Image (cartoon, rainbow, N blue to C red):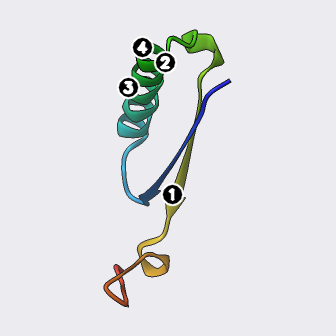
Amino acid sequence: MPLAQITILEGRSEEKKKKLIEDVSIAISESIGAPIETVRVLVQEIPPAHWGVGGKPKG
């Protein structure tokens, strides 16, 4: 069973995260021929204060 782990900053709507999960699932299914029912997608949200870019936190 394919598993995609996606890490994003907090703040996106439930609708956008649902769309992300749907689109990634379809892309994986189509690209490797896995039945979509077997595709797993894990979305992990990180607070901006815990996300560093260029040595500084985003939040």
- What whole-number distance in Å separates the C-alpha atoms at marks 3 and 1? 18 Å
- What whole-number distance in Å separates the C-alpha atoms at marks 3 and 2? 14 Å
Which x, y percent locates residue 36? 55, 13
Residue bearing the label numbered 2: 32
- What whole-number distance in Å separates the C-alpha atoms at marks 4 and 1? 26 Å
Residue found at the very far front of the displayed protein: 32
- Label 4 SS: helix
Q: Nearer the viewer, mark 1 or mark 2?
A: 2
Which of 13 and 52 lies nearest the eye of the viewer?
52
Residue bearing the label numbered 4: 30
Q: Residue at x 44, y 75 (%)?
A: 51
Which x, y percent locates residue 11? 38, 57
Residue bearing the label numbered 3: 23
Image position of 3 with respect to 31: above or below: below
Q: Residue at x 58, y 9 (%)?
A: 35
Q: Earlier in the sequence, mark 3 or mark 4?
A: 3
Residue bearing the label numbered 1: 45
- What whole-number distance in Å separates the C-alpha atoms at marks 2 and 4? 6 Å
Where is residue 2, by image quadrant?
top right
Which x, y percent locates residue 59? 36, 80
- What whole-number distance in Å separates the C-alpha atoms at marks 3 and 4? 11 Å
Q: Nearer the viewer, mark 3 or mark 4?
A: 4
Residue type beneath disc 1: Glu
